[in-house]
Amino acid sequence: MRLRTFVRCSASAAVLALSASPAWAQPGTTQQQPTNDAQTAQPEPVAGEEENVVVVTGIRESLRSSQNIRRNSDQIVDAVVAEDIGKLPDLNTAQTAARIPGVQVYRQGGEASNVLVRGLPNFTTTYNGREIFTAETRVVALQDFPSANIAALEVFKTSSADLVEPGLAGLVNVRSRRPFDFSEGQIAGSVWGIYTVQADSVTPNANLLFTERWNVGDGEMGFLLNASYTELNYLDSEPSNTDFIADPIINGQRVRFPDIQRLFYRSGNRVRPSVNAAFQWRPSDNFEFYAEMLWQGFRNKIDDRLVAVPLYGNGTYSNLVFRDGTNVLSSGTLTGLADPIFSFQGGTYNRTDTFQYAAGGIYESGPLRVALDIAHTDTTFRGSTESVDRIFTGQAGTAVDFNLEVPEFTIRNFDPTNIGNYLFDGLFEEKQEATGEDWQVRLDADYEISDFGFLRSVELGLRYTDRDAHREYGNRFAGFRGRNIPVSSLPLDFQLTPPGFVGTNVQSGFRSFLAPTYASIRNNLAELRQFVIANGGTNYTVEDLVPGTLFNATEETFAGYAQLNIGIGEQFDGVLGLRYLQVSTRVAGPTPTGIPSVDEGTESDELLPNASIRWRPAQDIQLRASVSRTVTRPNFSDLVPSITLGAPPPGGIGTDSAPRTGFGGNPFLRPFESWNYDASIEYYFGRASFAALTVFHRDLDGFIQPATFRFTDPELGVVQITGPTNTGAGRIDGVELQFQAFADFDWLPNWARGFGVQANVTYIDAATEQPDGAGGLAFFPITDQLNGVSDWNYNLVGIYERAGFSARLTYNGRSEYAATRQFRGGSPGNPDDIYTETAFPADRLDLSLNYEVFPNATIFADWTNITQSPFRQEFSSARGGAPRADYVRYLRYDETTVSLGLRFRL
């Protein structure tokens, strides 16, 4: 059934009403009534308070609104509400999410990314209650939402039948502002600059909101337009050891050590323009119509570069220092390198544009409420990478002092500022494009029952989606090792990199070298390709690389639900629901496989029950318990029936210490299911003060995580492929504890009552059945380089707010996590090495300041990553039965930002 058929079948229902946005119309979600300010959270009165609308301005009222979202919701929901127009607690929405209990993030490139809810990335993202995604993926990165455009960020940790199907981890809803959130027209905005310390750069940022509301006949209309522009120049540095332990004989004894050291700089310019608009029309008390639009852009110029120093070969070793009582090397000097020092300079440009349009309305009459929502999403990603490879000359006379414990190295007898000391080694190009679009149609009805015992309301709904995704990918490489072509002959400009560098001055080793500029690479591609062709580059043309089709995907879903809201007096209420889900998915690679289930796709039917109950033994205490079943589908890219290889390693042939890498899909992946159990006790003891303890358990079956394996190809050498796989059974157990309070004590002077505190800590014990290396299965931690699960996640926030001044000092951290677990060498069931990596994220200290200089003008400042502690990842290897050796895999010195700006209202 395609979209137009569904729309025709729904015509009779559409006559009843056009629906509102699910975020403000769907039964069971966090519905907030319009207030006198841009924020939509209307707090529930505390005993002894008057039922006045509270304008959300400042930290205290923001926390009060967030507290009441949790208190009044049927689900367990934690939220962050903007303190004012254009003011979430952080400049990055993903960074804001990290303040929520149980939410973990991965930080690099000057921002938070890879949001995990209770340790997992498997959640659904919605925008105003509608599903939203980027290109071929199933989610949108939260950091792509400019925080200045957001009214609230809501994390649903438990499920109900009326929600768009949450993933295992739940659902994250981003809520924007609408014209009826304001009592009258308004112009508001902010301008600020961000200084990035390591990149030594200042970038402009701005946000502007315009809204108006007017009477029309017996009703009213409203219009809102919100635009923002954010930009950041960033620089991270990563000194590293290779992930391979060599064991050569040096000076008559066998020695074990990582045989390559690297220095990698991740830098670039990231821009995110965004526009959202909303129109509302309420012609009468019974009807409300609306239309909404969102455009999100993402522009990323990645200016990355690397130097790799080979420590292996037949050179002369001296000054060797070993770890006590072992043959494991700590440091030394190598004179006369077997292979040249290798370097690349990247010039990548990525661009994403995502559009979402929606229209609908609400009809309400007495106990009946009907809503219909129609939305369309269209999103495109385009990316191209150029990598200019080089080698250093004079390897026979070069001496390298290396410290494997830091790690760092210095290069003697080499002048990195002399362009004559570099040779052209090759050009690698990569290009990809991904597109995605969908239509979503949703119909909801809610009927309140006033005189039928414990039954309070009945909810019914239907939802249909029609989704398409497409991805293209291609690469090419021309190598010139041994041709002795000086880089000075390339049609490129060179500079000492990084220029004006201050980023890793904590390192005493090698830091700067000559590299082509990003602009000269991107602006002279035709000339660079012509140079490659003129010097014998094969399979090259002056024209741009044309990527080939990687996959085409189509997916249709149909869902229907029924849900009962029950209650007994003021103390007990609950929800009983059942959602039926039918999914038809097809992901086809570039060529048919001959396997019907792959080429023709699959269909599945699921029943997703949920039940929850809430008990209020006292006005300020409530207890909750819930159970639900969720099913999480694989990403389209996870199902691709093919393998794609990346850039060749230095020298062109994969080795143990520098393998040829690639990625692939698994067309036999199946969706994984989870039974989810949650319970909480919540104590509300003030206007913005509460404490909550939540325990949760997840029973998993078939959890999807990456697996990495190696093999030796007669032409490519050592190849390392990473792809997804279904694990066996799994479990997640956890506890969340959160507390927030202000010093609202009568015996304190007025100035002292401005102090407040927030604290939360989450413990997670997560494991799934995975291969044990001996042909069986055993429980191991969930492993992923970016999405690994930390046992502990914690936040401590100190707050002060008084007399127009506010300050927030935030300490955020998470414990170590398993990044990878690989079986290397040997034979199936008897690997030569069980290789592991463990990540140790750095704790963060951030500061935010605000001062209201005039009633409608506020100066604000933010300082992130104050302590500048590095992210550390370590590896452990026991190749060939040798004792296990542990080294630092890499350190990453993340960017620090300082911002200063003005927020205003007119």
Image (cartoon, rainbow, N blue to C red):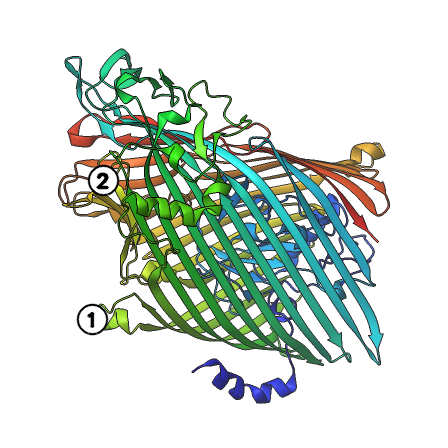
Position in image of residue 394 (x %, y %): 30, 21
Quarter of the image with the C terminus in it: bottom right
Crowd band around label 1 with a 10 angstrom C-alpha radius: few (<14), some (14–19), many (20+) = few
Horizontal side of 618 relative to 399 (left or right) equals right
Q: Residue at x 16, y 31 (%)?
A: 880
Position in image of residue 533 (x %, y %): 31, 47
| Quarter-of-image position of residue 324 | top left
Write down the residue under mark 2.
Answer: 654
Horizontal side of 47 relative to 778 (left or right) equals right
312 or 608: nearer the viewer = 312
Q: Is residue 425 above or below residue 397?
A: below
| Quarter-of-image position of residue 150 | bottom right
Q: Residue at x 77, y 49 (%)?
A: 57
Q: Is residue 187 visible?
A: yes
Q: Is residue 238 above or below residue 378?
A: above
Quarter of the image with the N terminus in it: bottom left
Write down the residue under mark 1.
Answer: 594
What amino acid is labelled 2 in the image? Gly
Q: Residue at x 27, y 15 (%)?
A: 335
Label 1: state its secondary structure. Answer: loop
Position in image of residue 111 (x %, y %): 55, 42
Position in image of residue 388 (x %, y %): 38, 40
Q: Is residue 129 above or below residue 719?
A: below
Crowd band around label 2 with a 10 angstrom C-alpha radius: few (<14), some (14–19), many (20+) = many
Horizontal side of 897 relative to 771 (left or right) equals right
426 or 896: nearer the viewer = 426
253 or 165: nearer the viewer = 253
